Image (cartoon, rainbow, N blue to C red):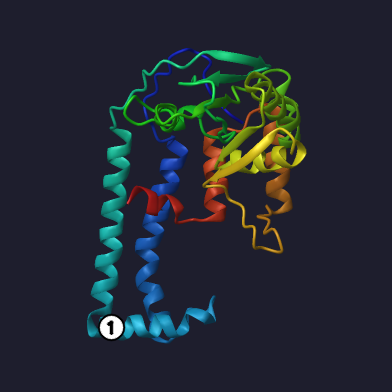
Amino acid sequence: MARTSHSSTHSSKVEVPPAALGLHLGLMLLSMMSSPAALQHAKDGLPPWNRDLRKKSQNLVRRMGRHASAAVQSASLNRGVALLAGLKAFREAEYVRTLPDPPVIWQQGGSTLMDYGARSKAAPAVLFVPSLINRPYVLDLSERTSLLRFLHAEGIHPFLLDWGSPGAEELDFDTGAYIAMRLIPAIERVAALTQRPVALAGYCMGGMLALAAAQATPSLVSKLVLLATPWDFHSSDFRRIALDPEGTDKLNAFIRSNRFLPPEYVQNLFYVMDPWLFHRKYQ
């Protein structure tokens, strides 16, 4: 669930959770140890788990020639060094956000709606919907790095929904409840304030929620903008990442006893979907 602050000024020091750091380092070591072993399969034209890569692996080994083993070891080591350098820089970052938030014009439960203002009455309104996981100020980091303040300067009237930290009511919310009881009322508030349908901009998981809200309130939404939204409009099927029954039971028991899912657990779930995502990010 979201873990956003309601204070007028956010101050945050970047840190990597210890559990996530363990995953980063463990996967790095696994890569360094397994790459030389995988090279022999590549020489045989295998990788056995994916026949479609056979020709590509043979061509790669052919280009490396007799120096293949040294090249693989060097590449693996360089990736590990780059990952460690990225993690070190991330953990030592001195960034602290001190930018004051704009006025709150609506609140329901733990969620709030912020108004970045308009330079004219004719300015088109855009309601930004962040992810339930990210803090909303990812779109408003500083005076020099702020999508919302840039749009304001360009003649747009931005609004930002802050999901807030789950309170007593939100603890039992599913995504449908967040859409029906938080996002749609926020859309209604902006539409009532501006006296016209609002453009809806969803970021990441917020784009998924914005999609559903736009379908549910077509008369209130004039446009839909999706930023980094994990949805494939050309797919005929939805690929589900399923946990084994024992893992599902343990996860449900943990949530029932703690009522919150810590960021470390969310990081683990992202690893299930793409084990090399964080390596590419920090390198």
Q: Is residue 158 left or right of residue 237?
A: left
> Residue 258, relative to residue 20: is it above or below?
above
Residue closer to the observer: 226 or 91: 226
Q: Position of residue 189 (x, y in %)?
A: 67, 21
Three-letter code, disc 1: Arg
Q: Which residue is mark 1?
A: 63
Res 11 → quadrant: top left
Residue closer to the observer: 249 or 9: 9
Q: Quadrant of the N terminus?
A: top right
Q: Is residue 246 left or right of residue 149?
A: right
Residue closer to the observer: 122 or 21: 122
Q: Position of residue 91 (x, y in %)?
A: 32, 34
Res 34 → quadrant: bottom left
Q: Residue at x 34, y 23 (%)?
A: 96
Q: Residue at x 69, y 58 (%)?
A: 238
Q: Position of residue 20 (x, y in %)?
A: 45, 41
Q: Position of residue 76 (x, y in %)?
A: 30, 63
Query: How many numbered marks, from 0 up?
Result: 1
Residue closer to the observer: 106 or 57: 106
> Residue 251, relative to residue 191: is it above or below?
below
Disc 1, SS: helix
Q: Residue at x 67, y 43 (%)?
A: 211
